[in-house]
Image (cartoon, helix red, strand yellow):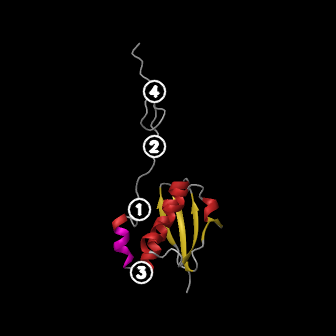
Amino acid sequence: MADKIFVGRRKNAVARVILRNGTGNVKVNKREFENYFPLKTNREDVLLPLRVTETLGKYDILANVQGGGFSGQSEAIRLGIARALVEINPEFRALFKVDSLLTRDPRMVERKKYGQPKARKRFQFSKR
């Protein structure tokens, strides 16, 4: 059976995730999972779909991720893993719906406007 690639996106991050039967080994961009994500919250975020479905040691995960920062990348990988698990077992869909793990978060960074230092911040107003 050929490996199927599942895509997850968040902010500007795009993750391509492959799930294989294995021992729970996780690699992100050919690096160890613990070394790639320095923050524990990001590591927990990636493993959340496996914890919800109680399949933590059953699959090896290979993820290629580009763009964005660490939080966007970890959430993109999370979405890719959730989509892969639903493909394997459609009964997981109900579990993921409760935690909204199958929803692609549409929030993006608001663009900077001209005449302002940032998207919403204004320059200091001077009456005189």
The earlier-in-sequence mark between 3 and 2 is 3
Q: Position of residue 67 (x, y in %)?
A: 56, 56
Judge whether residue 76 can be spotted in this image.
no
Residue, far top: 128
User: Which of the numbered marks, if any, corresponds to residue 123?
Assistant: 4
Q: What residue is at 41 percent from the left and 22 percent from the top?
A: 125
Q: Secondary structure at mark 4?
A: loop
The earlier-in-sequence mark between 2 and 1 is 1
The earlier-in-sequence mark between 1 and 3 is 3
Q: Which residue is mark 1?
A: 104
What's the distance in space between the residues labelled 4 and 1, CA to CA?
Answer: 34 Å
Image: magenta residue range: 91-97
The earlier-in-sequence mark between 2 and 4 is 2
Q: What residue is at 51 percent from the left and 56 percent from the top?
A: 41
The earlier-in-sequence mark between 4 and 1 is 1
* 75 part of magenta stretch: no
Q: Position of residue 103 (x, y in %)?
A: 38, 64
Amino acid on which disc 4 is placed: Phe
Q: Which residue is mark 2?
A: 111
Assign the C terminus to one quadrant of the image.
Answer: top left
Amino acid on which disc 2 is placed: Arg
What's the distance in space between the residues labelled 4 and 3, CA to CA?
Answer: 54 Å
Q: Secondary structure at mark 2?
A: loop
